[in-house]
Image (spheres, grey):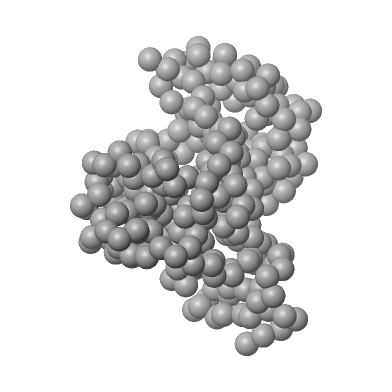
Amino acid sequence: MSHSGLTLLNNGNKLIIIQIKGELDMYGKNIYLKSLKQQLSVEYSCSPGDFEKHYNIVTECSNSEGRRIYSAGAPFLQMATLGGNAVITADISMHEWLKEFVKGKEGRSLFEYENLREIDRELSKYDKKLRSTYHMFLPDGNYTEPENLGLSIRWYKQDKLQQFYGSTEWKNALCSRFIPERPDMLAVTALDGDEILAMAGCSADTGEMWQIGVDVVEYCRGKGPATWLVTLLKIEIIKRGKIPFYGTSLSILYSWNTALKSGFFPAWVETVTVEKS
């Protein structure tokens, strides 16, 4: 069915709203942001509405069922912002210092170097340190199929991905091995004859959210295959009733450009601790 220039696809209990005129669909963005807040509330031991507050929130970390799993056990400290306040889930031993440190600060400013440095300094007392800040993207509501680059494409289902494990060429598109907690689900490649020039793959980081990664052979970078494949994979994930998302670091500008050109928008930023030693 359609309404106000939109095509609405009813996928079970989920409503996917697609813009058919190539314009930005704010309704689609809002649906994805609502789902994101629900997911982050599981991981940050808070409510979805806590990401809309006008002050920073500190909660006690927990090994919650349904969280994205990138390391064993509960994080010692993890922090996220959607551009307003920040929500920090941390070991109870850090709460007194954290609550005092974040008081009166804008949440998004906690991700600036001077504040990250202070948090890192406090973490060192517990033999912990911050990892990079991760800049995360969600679909922007534009689902236009990309123009073919004149290359062949080939899709690989989960049971055909094992042949690529162990290869350093596709370390962003796929995990290094099969990981049950976030299994690789699907990949699409761009080929010149039988040579794979680029690959985009996705892992089921949760039951509903599938993360996309992409790799391109060096001499083809900047020529379009990354955007082409990420867009194709994004659309395929949505057709399957899942939410695609994409992540990168602040300084990897070509990855940012790929996300933006593939129909993603910056949705949240987060960081987490690792062992210092």
Q: Residue at x 37, y 36 (%)?
A: 71
Judge whether 50 appears above or below 240 on screen.
above
The foreground one among 10 and 4 is: 4
Q: Residue at x 61, y 80 (%)?
A: 8
Q: Residue furthest left?
A: 163
Residue 79 quadrant: top right
Judge whether 155 appears above or below 204 on screen.
below
Judge whether 82 appears above or below 158 on screen.
above
Q: Is residue 195 visible?
A: yes
Task: Give the image location of residue 152, x and y in percent.
Answer: 37, 65
The foreground one among 120 and 171 is: 171
The answer to whether residue 69 is left or right of residue 193 is: right
Q: Check the picture and name the quadrant holding the C terminus.
A: top left
Q: Residue at x 22, y 53 (%)?
A: 162
Judge whether 246 appears above or below 128 on screen.
below
Q: Residue furthest bottom?
A: 1
Task: Give the image location of residue 88, x and y in percent.
Answer: 60, 34
The answer to whether residue 167 is left or right of residue 190 is: left
Task: Give the image location of residue 168, x and y in percent.
Answer: 30, 38
Task: Give the image location of residue 207, x and y in percent.
Answer: 41, 59
Q: Check the picture and name the quadrant holding the N terminus.
A: bottom right
The answer to whether residue 213 is left or right of residue 6 is: left
Q: How many marks?
A: 0
The foreground one among 34 and 168 is: 168
Residue 14 quadrant: bottom right
Q: Is residue 89 visible?
A: no
